[in-house]
Image: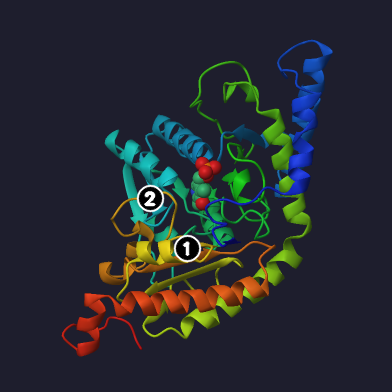
Amino acid sequence: MIYLDNAATTKMSRHAIDAMIPYMNEIYGNPSSLHSAGQLAKEALEEARARIAKVLGAEPREITFTSGGSEADNQAILSAARTGEKKGKRHIISTAFEHHAVLHTLDKLKKEGFEITLLDVHENGLVTAEQVGEAIRDDTALVTVMFANNEVGTVQPVEEIGRICRERGVLFHTDAVQAAGHLHIDVKKQNIDMLSLSAHKFHGPKGIGVLYAKRGIRLENIIEGGAQERGKRGGTENIPAIMGMARALEEAAAHLDENSAKMTALRDRLIAGLAEIPHAVLNGDREHRLPNNVSFCFEGIEGESLLLLLDDKGIAASSGSACTSGSLDPSHVLLAIGRPHEIAHGSLRLTLSHETTEEEIDKTIAAVKDVVAYLRSISPVWRDLESGKQKFITAA
Ligand SMILES: *Cc1c(COP(=O)(O)O)cnc(C)c1O
């Protein structure tokens, strides 16, 4: 199989798996237990916290373990909302193309009476720090803008957005789930107050993530229970997963430049190959994009059929986010960057890993060309476009 859906999830690194095993076989105590079996687990937990903090440029006490990126996003946003509310601040700024973990949490707050400003995303898939600056008001409690978009791969000017938020005294959260392992993260240098990570997006285990919250920020519990995580997140800690995540994050950071350069070269080869297909448009900025993301819309085809036929050829791809597949609505991200419905339906996202090879890329280019040509040959919409009965939206 040629696996090109690394934005949905990644294969676990061998080292991360190895780092987990002792915490299932031998050191399986509950970190809250007072006996030495528990204390060994507790030591491992705190060591992992310190190692993760170091990679992010944070302090250990600023790291809270969660069940993943979604929970971290929920907790960050709800915490900032509760803090803001106490000071009469009930306005939140975000963007129209965030992950649903962010957008649905904002919907919930909207029903509670919060006012949500969703910034327009430019056609290149970017928002600017100026847009954020213009939207900030006296009653703004939080700005939450993703580090890198999971569908079109664009990388936002996080450091500048953070600087503006800091100048204006507004909390800044970023969903960095897609950035981790691909881009350098330094929460202090990048002016980030809160940040979400998910291990399974950087070759760690599923069901574990991190919420970084700068010292002094009050976190609101969303899981009530015991005193774990300084009382901010109840539930026995998933030590094996935490150990696997710490290892995966360190490994990703250690090889970041090398892996990123390798993926960027293959990404560009793939973009160049697919751009040869007539009536194809690249989604997202050419420069400010993740080293592993390729996203296209092909006019006159259905993304779902494209995926199924690629799957038959042994290629795992996506039409956008895993969360929207299965629904017939076009992706909210593609609509946010202004892609009309007609072409948003014909989307294809291919996301690479450091293990992707040139041979796999070349096979993929050939397969996509074949499948797109075949689907167009049987498409009544394409027939109308070619005969001029309907107008093309995209350039030839
Ligand atoms: C995958 C993803 C999430 C959700 O992370 P989970 O750990 O799967 O809950 C959140 N935000 C972005 C940008 C993602 O890509």
User: In this rendering, does residue 59 appear at all?
Assistant: no
Horizontal and vertical percent position of residue 91: 36, 44
**The disc labelled 1 sits on which kind of residue?**
Asp
Q: List the single residue furthest toward the top.
A: 35
Q: 243 or 219, which lies in front?
A: 243
Q: Which mark is residue 368?
A: none
Crowding near pointer 1: few (<14 within 10 Å), some, many (20+)?
few
Q: CA distance from mark 2 to mark 1?
A: 52 Å
Horizontal and vertical percent position of residue 395: 34, 86
Horizontal and vertical percent position of residue 381: 23, 76
- The tally of labels here is 2
Where 286 sits versus 226, above or below?
A: below
At x 69%, y 35%, the residue is 242
Horizontal and vertical percent position of residue 358: 66, 75
**The disc labelled 2 sits on which kind of residue?**
Arg
Residue identifier under label 1: 312
User: In this rendering, does residue 326 appear at all?
Assistant: yes
Where 353 sits versus 366, above or below?
A: above
SS for dot 1: helix
Q: 99 or 3, which lies in front?
A: 3
Q: Which mark is residue 137?
A: 2
Answer whether labels 2 and 1 touch (C-beta < 8 Å).
no
Q: How is the image coloured?
A: rainbow
At x 78%, y 25%, the residue is 25
Name the front one of labels 2 and 1.
1
Where 211 sits versus 97, above or below?
A: above
Mark 2 vs mark 1: which is more N-terminal?
A: 2
SS for dot 2: loop
Q: Is mark 2 within 8 Å of ligand 1?
A: no
The C terminus: image quadrant? bottom left
